[in-house]
Each structure stands twice: as structure tokens, then as C-alpha cells.
Amino acid sequence: MPLTSVDQVPSEDAVLAQIREELVLSGNYFSTYDAELLQALGGTAAAAAAAALVILCTRFLRGRGGTYPETRRVKLTGAILPPVTILGAELVSFISSLPLIRTFGNGPGTFVIKLFCTLFSVTAAWGLFRIVGVIDDELRNFAEKRNRALDNLTAGIVGSILKAAIFLTTFLFIGQSIFDINISALLASAGVVGLAFALAAKDTVSNFFGTLVIIADMPFRIGDRIECGTVCGIVQSVGMRSSRVITDDGTLCTIPNSLLTNAVVFKRNRKGHLKRVIDLGLTYDTSPQDMEKAVRLLHRIMDDFHGRDQREFAPRIFFSSFGAYSLNLRAIVFFKTEYFEEEEKLLNELNFAILREFTHAGLRFAYPTQTLFVQFPQNTDGPPPCSARSSM
């Protein structure tokens, strides 16, 4: 790289003269447009002070009334007021600064106007985000009501989709209308990149569509107890890619949504009740009368267990089968809970009650046994045929 000659380096006097000239020009500019500058600064300061005062007063009033429940109108007003206040302050600042902006010329002035338009768009998007937040809360409150088809899962997904749509619309509007970016070419390039990304992340895409299937089909809700493969637990959350399930020992399992849509999912609870199947085996020397007594005892223990039973959740008890070594009874009972801890307490209490009542009634539980028959030939003088019974 050739060295710069000494003649091309400006002297100190030339630099100072240039600085003095620029200061004179700046002084002339401020002296010429001092009214426009004062109007812009005064309008911006007044708008900012008014917006801050309105927001502080709103927060103070909401804090004073925090002990009272907020209505939908109060929530919506609290969500809209800050963005509207800031948008009004930006509009006042723009109007008061417009005479000063016109002095900048076409290039810088147009750029400043575009910046103001960008601020308007971002503030409006922020306000829409807050409105969507209120709608999301209302949907969740509506979902918590009993016997509603809508649940927290759908409410959360709807809120996420609306926020994504607002963000994308704002981004496209700012790029296309304000900064004159060729969105069509950008979208075409994004389509090619998106196709390559979809091929590389097909599992993620399938999990996302699995989430949409869960929303449409409603196989379970948040808080339900499900069983999928070897995992059995309570659904804690459903995301865009996977669902989280807490098992009875407190383990947090993450299951891809595509697996939940392609596998068999068992829902273990219904309307606040948890189904439990209890199998009991009595010895083969139990008489028919004692089997009937066992059924009556189970009904006495399980009917209206911890509260009156609804008709559809009444216990079902019956003589189920003749087993290999026992006469089997099956009891289908619905615990009035959906939580692991409460279920464990109820099951413990029920098992102790069955053991006490059956022991007091003289009913014996069976255990694995095997009976052996030995047959001797009749043309010998050996002992007669005999049988033996042993436990396994």
C-alpha cells in the first residue's frame, strides 16, 4: 500500500478552519430553525411526561383496588391503556417535530419519518399482544369451568398462534411498507430455505402436526392421567413439540407429540374420578355361599367409598373366572380423585378394609399351588393311586 505524501495530509490550521466552519453552519442552523427545534423538544417532553403520568396513575389506582376482583372491562382497559398512551405520545411528538423534520431534506427527513412509522407499528403490535394476553386469560378461565370442550391446551395454542401472526404481520408491514424491502423475493428465498429445513427437521415438523392433531381430536386434557406405552402419569403441559407427564414417583417424562398421536393412549380418569381394577383370588374349596358373601362384603366396603357414588361411577363387582389355582373376583371401583397421593391413601385404606373383613369372615385368599396325581399299574402289588398338592 503506497504511503500518503506529506502534501496530502491536511494541516492543523486547515482542520481547525473546517471545524470552525461546521460550528458556524450549525449555529446558523439552530439560530434559523430555533422555533421548530423548541417546538419539537417541547412537544416531545410534554408528551413523554403526560404518558408517564397516565401510566403511573393507572398503576397506582390498580394497586389501591387490588383487593377487588378485576372484571373483563378492567382487564381490557388495563391492557390497552399503556400502549394507547404511548402511541398518543409518539403521535404528539411526531406532529410537533414535523416542521423540524422538513428542514432535514428529502433523504434524512424521509428516514426519520420511517423511523416514526416503525415506532407506531411496534407500539400497535405491543398493544395487540397485550389484548391477546387478556383473551388468553379469559379462555383459560372459561376452560376451567366444568364440562367445557375447550381446555387450557387449546387456549395456550390459540394465544401462541395469534401472537405469532401479529409478529409476522408487523414484520412484513415494516419491511414492505416502510423500508421498501422486496418481501416477495424474501418469501421465495424463505420458501426454499424452509423446504430444506423441513426435510432436515422432519421429526420436529411431525411433532408440530401432532400438536395440531391433539388440539383437534382432544384425546386428553392438561391434568388428565394417561398411559402411553410404559409411561403412566398426569399431563402437566403440552407444547408445540412434546408433552410433559409426571409419573407416580415424581419423574418428569417428555413424550414427543407425534408418538402420542400414533400410539394407543389410555385415559385413566373421567370427570374427577380415577378408575381402579382390583382382582382377588379365593381358594378352590370356597363354597358358592362364601363367594356370594365375598361379593356382598366387597359391595359393603366399596359402595359410597368416601362420598356418595354417582350412577355411572358405582362399583362393579362380579365372579370373573375360574383360575388355575383360584376362584377369581374382579372389582372395578372409581376413586373420587385424580391425584397420585390421594389415590395411594384411598387404595391403602381399601386394601386394609378388604383384608380385615375377609379375615373376619373366614375367607381365604389363594396362592399359586400345583396338584400332582400319581397312577400305579394295576397288575402290580404296589400302593393304590394317590395325589399330592404342593405350593409353588
Image (tube, rainbow, N blue to C red):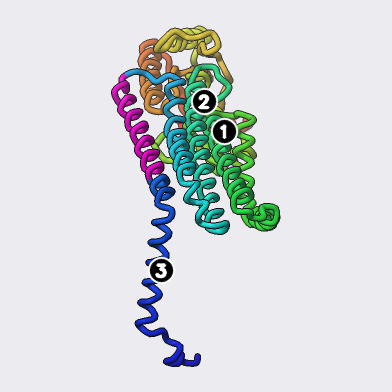
Look at the numbered disc 2 and give the secondary structure of its residue. helix
Q: Tell me if residue 3 comes above or below residue 44 in the rendering.
A: below
Q: Are marks 1 and 2 in contact (CB under 8 Å)?
A: yes
Q: Quadrant of residue 213?
A: top right
Q: Earlier in the sequence, mark 1 or mark 3?
A: 3
Q: Earlier in the sequence, mark 2 or mark 3?
A: 3
Report the Cα–Cα distance between label 1 and label 2: 9 Å
Residue of label 2: 139
Tell which tag, 1 or 3, sits nearer the viewer: 3
Q: How many marks?
A: 3
Above or below for 18 versus 222: below
Q: Which span is picked out in magenta? A: 42-67
Residue 207 quadrant: top right
Q: Is residue 67 above or below residue 14?
A: above
Task: Classify mark 2: residues with Cα within 10 Å, few (<14), some (14-19) or many (20+).
Answer: some
Residues marked 1 and 3 touching at CB (< 8 Å): no
Residue 321 % position (x, y)? 58, 20
- Residue position for label 3: 22
Q: Which amino acid type is shown beneath numbered disc 3? A: Glu
Q: Is residue 299 above or below residue 57?
A: above
378 and 228: which is toward the camera: 228
Q: Residue 319's x, y, as percent?
A: 56, 15
